[in-house]
Each structure stands twice: as C-alpha cells, then as structure tokens.
Image (spheres, rainbow, N blue to C red):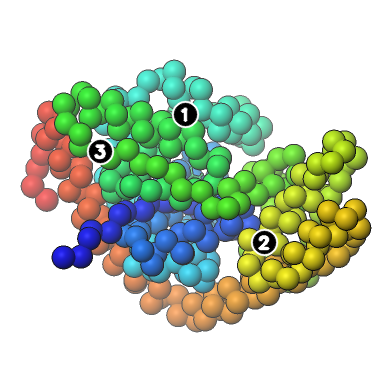
Amino acid sequence: MENQKKSVLSCIQPTGAMHLGNYFGAVKNWVDLQKDYQCIYGIVDYHAMTMPYDIKKLRTRVWDLITDLVATGVEPENLFIQSLIPEHAELCWIFNCFCSYGNLTRMTQFKDKSNDSQAKSKDNFISAGLLDYPVLQSADILIYKADFVPVGKDQDQHLELTRNIAQRFNTTVGKEYFVLPKSLHSDTPKIKSTADPSRKMSKSAGEKHFINVFAEEARIRKQVRSAVTDTGDTKAGTMSEGVENIFQLIQACENRPTEYAELMKDYENGELKYSDLKDVLAEALVELTNGFKLKRAELNENKRELKYKIKQSSEAIRKVAQETVKEVKDLVGLMNVKF
Ligand code: TYM
C-alpha cells in the first residue's frame, strides 16, 4: 500500500513583485517539494489588507503573482486564492479565542510593520488586522493540517505561535486534533538587501532594497553592479555581509558551480575582485530569470485558461478547509449547518 504523502502548506502576500528573497527563501522550495509531498500554496489577499493598500490594484496583483508563481514552476492545481476560501477567516476567529493578546504584541513583525503602517497612512492608522495577522496565518496552516511549512527565517516566530495555538486548542478540546507544523528552510532562508546587507531583502523597505525576479535584464544588472560589498566595518578574517549575500545568491542560482568555487578560492587567497563576483551573479540571475520570463509570456497569452484553473483548484482546496472547520466547530461547541 502506498504511504500517504506528508502535507506542505505555504503562502505569499500579493503586495507587489516577487523578489529574490521570496524566490530563494521560499518559492524555489515550494517548486521542489511538489515532487514528494501533497502541496497547497496560497495567495493571501486577506493578509494584504492589513497594511495601507490600493484597492484598485489588489485583484490585478493577485493574478500577476499567480502568473509569476506558475512561471517559476508552481503547479496551478496546488494554488488557491485565500479570499475564495472564507473558512480561513472563520477559523481565524475561533483561534483568536485560543491565542493570548500578549503573544500577539510580542511579534517582531507586528512591531516593525506597525511603525511602517503608521508612516504610510495619513492618520497614523494601525489596523487591528495587523495585530491579528499571525492568527490568520495559523488558520492558513492548520486548516490544511500541514506537516511542513516552507518559509524564510522571518516567519519562524509566526510558526512558533501557530504551534502554541494548536497545542492550546488540543489541550482545551482534550484531543490531539491538530498536528504541530514545522517550518522548512531553504539553504538561503534570509536573503539580504543588496543595497543594505544589514537588512533583509523586502518590498516594504523601498525599490532599491529588493531585486524583482521578473525585472528587465538591464535593471537586474544595474542593481547587482551597485550592490554593497564591504562597508569597511567587517572584522578581520570574516566575510562581510554584502559579499556573503552575493556568494549565497550565486550558489542559490545553481547554474555557476565552477565560477562559485573559483571565486571562493580567490576570496580565501585574498585575491577576490568584487567586480568579478558581481559579474558572475548578474550572469547567473539573468540566465535563471530569462527562463521564467519566457514561461510567463506564454502564460500571459492565455490568461483566461489560467484563471479558470485557479478557480477550480481553489474550489477543490476549499473542500478540505470546510471539512476542518466543520470538525473544529463540533469540537468547540459551535453550531454546524450542513454544506
Ligand atoms: P511574504 O509574502 O512576506 O513572503 C513570502 C515568503 O518569502 C519569504 N521571504 C524571504 N525569505 C528569505 N529572505 C528574504 N529576504 C525573504 N523575504 C521574504 C517569507 O519568509 C515567506 O516564506 N506571513 C507571510 C505570508 C503567510 C504565510 C501563511 C506563510 C500568510 N499565511 C501561512 C506561510 C504559511 C508573509 O508575509 O510572507
């Protein structure tokens, strides 16, 4: 008898372009895991509402991100759009009652993003949704009873909270109902900004702090050329964060192994030229992303077919979510209507 495959769940926010941090930190893993696991991946538009956003752009961003994900190798039948599965929000409410307020205020992303949100809004507005965001994330994960969650390092604290909620729920209802999910990291779980390697690559920090996977070739080359290598405050004998980040990116591309080894040797011998290092990274990225761009152009020729597939896959995935919510409502003493 065939063993049941372990399940994998992960999500991404439709808040703009997919950058190299998203790709190497998470999405590349999503693609690889599809061979051996039962995978479900979400575009989380409810999450994208927690910060000030442009209503007119949100739907387009969802479809663009779906096209990008499929172009990089994610199977359309594994994808869902969060707002097509309202059970996520329903389970989030139930989980709110299994999560302490204090835990939410301790989330470092809440602290960082609330400053950012305040700065972006005209009236110093921080939404309650931003505080509650990790509870919705826990619902995203637990609703599919995921064993593994492939994410970047920045999500570890949210995963810890998810396990806390699952544990509290299990103890309260007196049943080991939810499995405790584990995060899965790639070899590059924290890609840094090439403009400022002391911070992670992210969209919220501004244009120069992320490299868009689908950017024009000339833009990728320009951003790599201007990457910060050494700010002069690195301890002797240790590699600077900027140089380390570039080495990691070259390795993650997996298409320049010989050059990587030679550059590393140059570094160890104290003969590394930063311009050579950057040239190799630019070539590696251009080669990798050109393949994605071709695939995306093909997909864009038949947008309707892709949209149809995603609506179908969201409907199929919703059945799993409905089943979980029905069981959870039974367990916590709420009413159930047949669906
Ligand atoms: P988001 O949309 O910010 O990022 C999507 C994925 O990309 C990873 N990532 C990075 N990895 C390495 N280096 C970086 N610089 C970098 N920047 C981003 C993120 O860790 C993430 O895996 N809260 C999540 C979305 C979410 C989610 C979930 C994830 C909602 N529900 C359920 C997993 C499971 C977020 O904002 O990711």
Residue receiving disc 3: 178
Question: Which of disc 2 and disc 3 is earlier in sequence?
Answer: 3
- In this rendering, position of residue 46 left or right of residue 311: right
Residue receiving disc 1: 131
For label 2, the crowd category at 10 Å Cα-Cα, with few meaning under 14, some 14 to 19 and many 20 or more, is some
Quarter-of-image position of residue 269: bottom right
Q: Nearer the viewer, residue 317 or 274?
A: 274
The x, y position of residue 305, in whole percent, is 38, 77
Residue receiving disc 2: 251
Q: Nearer the viewer, residue 167 or 129?
A: 167
Quarter-of-image position of residue 273: bottom right
Which element carries disc 3, helix, strand or loop?
A: loop
| Residue at image coords 32%, 48% | 146
| Separation of marks 3 and 1 at Cα, in angstroms | 23 Å
Quarter-of-image position of residue 2: bottom left
| Residue at image coords 55%, 42% | 153
- In this rendering, position of residue 100 left or right of residue 130: left
